[in-house]
Amino acid sequence: MSQETKGQNHQPATSPGETSQAGNRLTRAWSRAAGSDFIWSFKRSPVAVVSFLVALGLVLGAVLAPLFAPHNPFDPATLNLMNGFSSPMQPNAFTGEVFWLGTDDQGRDVFSTILYGMRISLFVGFAAVAFAMVLGVTLGLIAGYVGGWIGAVIMRIADVQLTFPGILVAMLIFGIAKGFTPLEQRDEMAIWVLIIAIGLSEWVQFARVVRGATMVEKGKEYVQAARLNGRGAGGIMIRHILPNVLGPVLVIATISLALAIIAEATLSFLGVGAPPTQPSLGTLIRIGQGYLFSGEWWILLFPSVTLLALALSVNLLGDWLRDVLNPRLR
């Protein structure tokens, strides 16, 4: 091998000048983002900042639960029944252990159960909203762009569903889906059935908003130009119309996330949601409600406050996002 070839093989992949240029581009991009109207509005809204920090802290606590939780509440090997009904910040009368938020009847640390319970609630909420968004946006695009009897059928189904409360629709779908699930797999499939049930009860709002926006966009010049260039209906809906209707969709998704978390907690509280082996915040509240009048108030209070903080912070963020993305309020 020649010396020239060896020298070429030992040249660095990127020169210092290229690295400096990449760093400068990132700095300029960050400066543009920090100076955008979106970030300026966020900084000027104390409610949005506090809501974001609360939601971020709760989400990180749930995602990193194995790191933050003092115990694994769902590992029977780590439980001690002698720690049952320990008061918050008070040493247990038998073991002397101190728990920040107390323990439940099984001796499980309430703080740890909240962190692990939020993982189930957030997973169900995000998955249900993602499912509802995909279904609703797809049907809304078809109803708005294709129209005709197809659009009429889709929107009449949506109108009929709107006449029923969402929680009743979710309970009905959950009961029907659970009836088709084999008995030995019901606990394993309960979370996925819950996601489908909540998603099918939340798709209507996405479909109605996307249909209206699509009917406005399909008459604009860029859609007409794409049609004249021979692009099909599917390509026009996905590549041209969809990016222009995502603003309202993101707002609805944020607000629907809070509603999905509350719906999951409601179903679990009623005993038709998450199984006892995978308790969510709603399950923890249902368990704590049974001990409220016997003096163990902390078993109910702390999961309830956590659910309230999570749903309220997400809902306030959704309200702020709706105001920011509304062109009439600019």
Image (cartoon, rainbow, N blue to C red):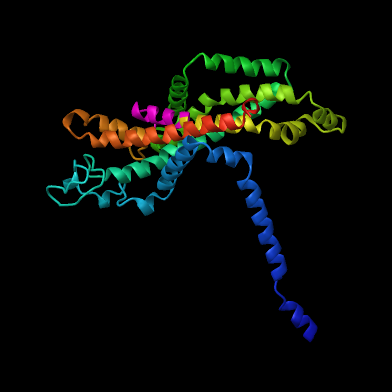
User: Residue 271 lies in magenta, yes or no?
Assistant: yes
The answer to whether residue 189 is visible is no
> Residue 23 sits in which quadrant?
bottom right
* Left or right: 83, with 168 as reference point: left
Q: Please, is residue 76 above or below residue 268 in the view?
A: below
User: Residue 169 lies in magenta, yes or no?
Assistant: no
- Rendered location of residue 271, percent (x, y): 34, 28
From the viewer's side, name the closer residue of 297 and 163: 297
What is the magenta range? 259-274
- Rendered location of residue 324, percent (x, y): 59, 32
- What secondary structure is the stretch in magenta mostly built from? helix
From the viewer's side, name the closer residue of 77 and 137: 137
The residue lying at 44 percent from left, 19 percent from top is 168
The residue lying at 85 percent from left, 31 percent from top is 225
Which image quarter is the N terminus in?
A: bottom right
The residue lying at 72 percent from left, 19 percent from top is 147
The residue lying at 53 percent from left, 26 percent from top is 202
